[in-house]
Image: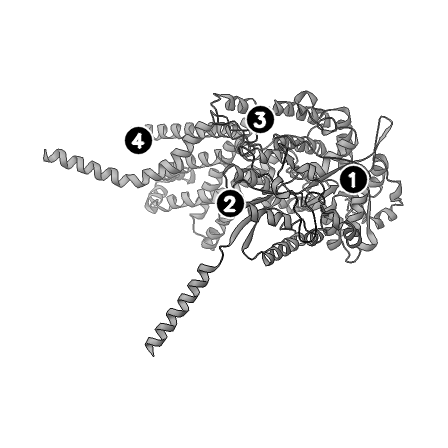
């Protein structure tokens, strides 16, 4: 009897401890998701309102999937995610490896490297819009002076070039965060392992494959899944630079969510798109956690 | 001594408290608008608010200034979440119905009972002395007062550029003559192989392509969105991919390619080019006149070098089609969630008094008819702009609830045509199909 009471009182205490955190998660995360899910199945066209927001089934989803530019949007979003994440992870890893080595001025370089990530997104976007402008931009001016090109490149006037440009800005903006995370992981690798490997005659690639990579893998995968989820949700950078153009060339789903919600007042359709992105992110998360579990079982 | 000080302190405290209790509670009103970034207009706003508060010390007006780009999305969101200001500025050219319909029963209160018989201290009758009041009605109710109005477009030009090219502005009466002149004035002056003076500038940047940048080209050619933009606004009445619209867009695309700075251009990159002389002609609207007067280079050149001419006529299939202008206003409305509608009405009525309307005249046309003669005498260029505009037919874009989505489609299709991303025919056909879906 006494043991049962002790366990019950321990359980009560545990619930009390997790209550505040749970309340925050429920209010700030679960509730908005549930509300968005409900809105995605109800009528929410603000400029032609209907009382009580009646249930409309899958009409909002049909509206989203039936968009003329839907196939283009999905293609652009996938390219943006894959290229953006691979680029950020690659640039971050390369930078971390370089900054893990000792060289004169390393501290200064480490500090300067943070700047793209620390800058407000609006500033970054304006910077690149000006730098890549065909008439006034520095990039075209330098390339013309060096005779690499004979006429200015209209970066934001061709859909393919515009997509490359926004992906580049995405990589430039966010790779420092990845570099910092991986650098921290690299700093935790004991130097003796590298010394022993050198004694055994291991080269650079072998050291990376056998020492560096296994050590940083846990951090790598956490950062990877975070980057995937964050890139799926991207809106700000693309909207500020190209508004999804030219000719839907950079219209990722995040931009379309904004346009539907706040430009066209179609909250139902925007909610359906939002739920689609949630599903997208969940798929990545499930795959990731399944992979981690398999690794742990193997170990 | 200590006791006397304590008594004195208590007496002072009680006096202050009595003063506070006796003071009438201050009414606080929030006013939403977007043009504060313009220093000329900001000065007018500062004056208006300060003067109203001086006359009504128990009322406080808090301006909420949002950038033009963000204003409309923010207004919709705030109305949807019941957080918009007590007084909001709207735009009859950007659609009023969309915002009015967000709240059940209407987002703005009816002003009919306030307007009836209302006269300002200077004698202005809100019923009789304001223009554009017919545009202020929704569901048979007056929901806003017009405040200020605009008209567009006339063609601004630099006289010296036309003179250098041997062009007489009086001959630029048709689109063909206009294009020929623009081509003559598109030159490489320093011989380095790149054009440094452009004959004509037209904004391609989608946000700017609203009713006062491209619709008048379509209307002048005989096209538009619906026939003469009159109801019924049903999918079967759409004419966006009509031959007339195609003619207009193809013309604009050709002009953009041959005579305009390349790339995605905004109004606020073209205007500085006009100021400093690398752009010879551009279509402007009334509020641009004051900006050009202020910033045209070299300093003092405005008087001698600024020219204004009517928008040219289109010649389509042998028929000359006179220009069609667009007139619109920035009315002020009172939100249905305003707790002090009487005080709010007093303020928006004040904005239509002669003094305020004179202040606003520097960048806009006044809606108070009693100041028209003063306006002509004191802002002759702006008055001339209005006089030219009033010679021709004017239209306004259809005020349908789906306007925001329709205008987005228009902007994307015209922009893609001008930048060569799609052929005008493909772009207009796409836009027509999309608009049909939206209206269904």
Secondary element under disc 3, as helix, strand or loop, is: helix
State which chain disc 1 sits on.
B
Q: Name the residue under label 1.
A: B259
For the residue pair B368 and B430, the one nearer the viewer reads as B368
Mark seen at residue B135: none
* Residue B65 visible to the viewer: no
For the residue pair B89 and B271, the one nearer the viewer reads as B89
Picture coordinates of residue B25, whole percent (x, y): 49, 55
Q: Mark 3 points at which residue?
A: A72
Disc 3/disc 2 C-alpha distance (Å): 48 Å
Mark seen at residue B339: 2
Residue that lies at the very extreme toward the left in this rendered image: A1
> Residue placed at 55% from the left, 48% from the top?
B30
For residue B407, above or below residue B122: above
State which chain disc 2 sits on.
B
Disc 2/disc 1 C-alpha distance (Å): 54 Å
Secondary element under disc 1, as helix, strand or loop, is: helix
State which chain disc 3 sits on.
A
Secondary element under disc 4, as helix, strand or loop, is: helix
Sequence-wise first label, 3 or 4: 3
Tag 2: Cα neighbours inside 10 Å, few (<14), some, or many (≥20)?
few
State which chain disc 4 sits on.
A
Secondary element under disc 2, as helix, strand or loop, is: loop
> Residue placed at 75% from the left, 37% from the top?
B256
Sequence-wise first label, 2 or 1: 1
Q: Name the residue under label 4.
A: A296
């Amino acid at each position: 009897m006494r043991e049962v009471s002790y366990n019950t009182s321990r359980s009560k205490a545990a619930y009390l401890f997790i209550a505040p955190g749970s309340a925050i998660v429920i209010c700030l995360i679960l509730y908005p998701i549930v509300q968005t899910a409900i809105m995605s199945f109800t009528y929410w066209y603000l400029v032609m309102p209907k009382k009580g927001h009646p249930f409309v089934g899958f009409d909002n989803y049909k509206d989203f999937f039936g968009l003329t530019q839907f196939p283009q949007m999905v293609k652009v979003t996938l390219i943006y995610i894959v290229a953006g994440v691979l680029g950020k992870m690659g640039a971050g890893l390369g930078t971390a490896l370089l900054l893990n080595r000792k060289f004169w001025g390393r501290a200064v370089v480490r500090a300067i490297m943070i700047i793209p990530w620390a800058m407000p997104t609006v500033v970054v976007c304006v910077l690149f819009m000006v730098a890549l402008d065909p008439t006034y931009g520095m990039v075209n001016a330098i390339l013309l002076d060096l005779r690499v090109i004979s006429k200015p490149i209209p970066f934001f006037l061709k859909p393919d070039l515009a997509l490359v440009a926004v992906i580049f800005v995405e990589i430039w903006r966010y790779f420092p965060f990845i570099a910092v995370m991986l650098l921290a992981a690299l700093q935790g690798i004991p130097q003796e392992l590298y010394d022993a490997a050198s004694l055994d005659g291991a080269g650079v690639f072998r050291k990376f494959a056998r020492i560096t990579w296994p050590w940083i893998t846990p951090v790598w995968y956490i950062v990877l899944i975070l980057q995937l989820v964050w890139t799926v949700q991207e809106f700000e950078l693309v909207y500020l630079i190209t508004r999804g153009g030219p000719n839907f060339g950079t219209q990722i789903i995040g931009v379309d969510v904004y346009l539907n919600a706040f430009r066209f007042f179609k909250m139902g359709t925007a909610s359906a798109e939002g739920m689609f992105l949630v599903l997208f992110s969940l798929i990545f998360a499930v795959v990731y956690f399944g992979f981690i579990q398999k690794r742990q079982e193997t170990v | 001594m200590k006791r006397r000080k304590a008594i004195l302190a208590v007496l002072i405290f009680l006096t202050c408290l009595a003063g506070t209790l006796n003071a009438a509670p201050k009414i606080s009103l929030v006013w939403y608008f977007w043009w504060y970034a313009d220093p000329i207009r900001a000065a007018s706003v500062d004056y208006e608010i300060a003067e109203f508060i001086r006359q009504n010390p128990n009322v406080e007006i808090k301006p909420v200034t949002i950038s033009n780009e963000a204003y409309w999305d923010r207004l919709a969101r705030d109305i949807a979440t019941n957080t918009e200001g007590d007084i909001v500025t709207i735009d009859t050219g950007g659609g009023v119905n969309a915002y009015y319909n967000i709240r059940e029963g209407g987002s703005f209160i009816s002003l009919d009972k306030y307007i009836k018989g209302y006269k300002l201290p200077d004698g202005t009758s809100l019923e009789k002395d304001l223009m554009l009041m017919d545009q202020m009605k929704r569901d048979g109710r007056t929901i806003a007062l017009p405040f200020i109005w605009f008209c567009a477009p006339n063609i601004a030009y630099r006289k010296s550029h036309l003179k250098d090219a041997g062009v007489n502005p009086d001959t630029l009466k048709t689109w063909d003559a206009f294009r020929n002149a623009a081509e003559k004035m598109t030159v490489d002056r320093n011989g380095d192989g790149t054009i440094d003076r452009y004959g004509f500038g037209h904004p391609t940047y989608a946000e700017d392509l609203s009713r006062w940048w491209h619709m008048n080209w379509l209307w002048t050619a005989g096209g538009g969105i619906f026939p003469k933009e009159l109801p019924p606004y049903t999918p079967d009445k759409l004419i966006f991919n009509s031959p007339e619209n195609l003619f207009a867009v193809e013309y604009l695309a050709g002009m953009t390619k041959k005579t305009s700075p390349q790339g995605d251009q905004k109004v606020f990159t073209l205007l500085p080019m006009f100021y400093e002389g690398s752009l010879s002609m551009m279509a402007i609207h009334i509020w641009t006149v004051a900006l050009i007067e202020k910033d045209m280079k070299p300093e003092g050149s405005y008087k001698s070098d600024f020219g204004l001419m009517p928008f040219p006529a289109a010649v389509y299939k042998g028929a000359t089609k006179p220009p069609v202008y667009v007139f619109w206003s920035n009315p002020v409305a009172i939100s249905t969630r305003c707790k002090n509608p009487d005080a709010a009405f007093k303020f928006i009525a004040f904005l239509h008094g002669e003094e305020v309307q004179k202040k606003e005249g520097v960048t806009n046309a006044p809606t108070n008819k009693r100041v028209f003669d003063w306006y002509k005498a004191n802002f002759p260029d702006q008055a001339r702009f209005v006089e030219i505009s009033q010679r021709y037919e004017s239209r306004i874009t259809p005020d349908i609830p789906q306007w925001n989505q329709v205008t987005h489609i228009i902007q994307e299709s015209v922009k893609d045509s001008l930048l060569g991303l799609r052929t005008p025919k493909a772009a207009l056909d796409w836009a027509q199909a999309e608009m049909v879906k939206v209206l269904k």
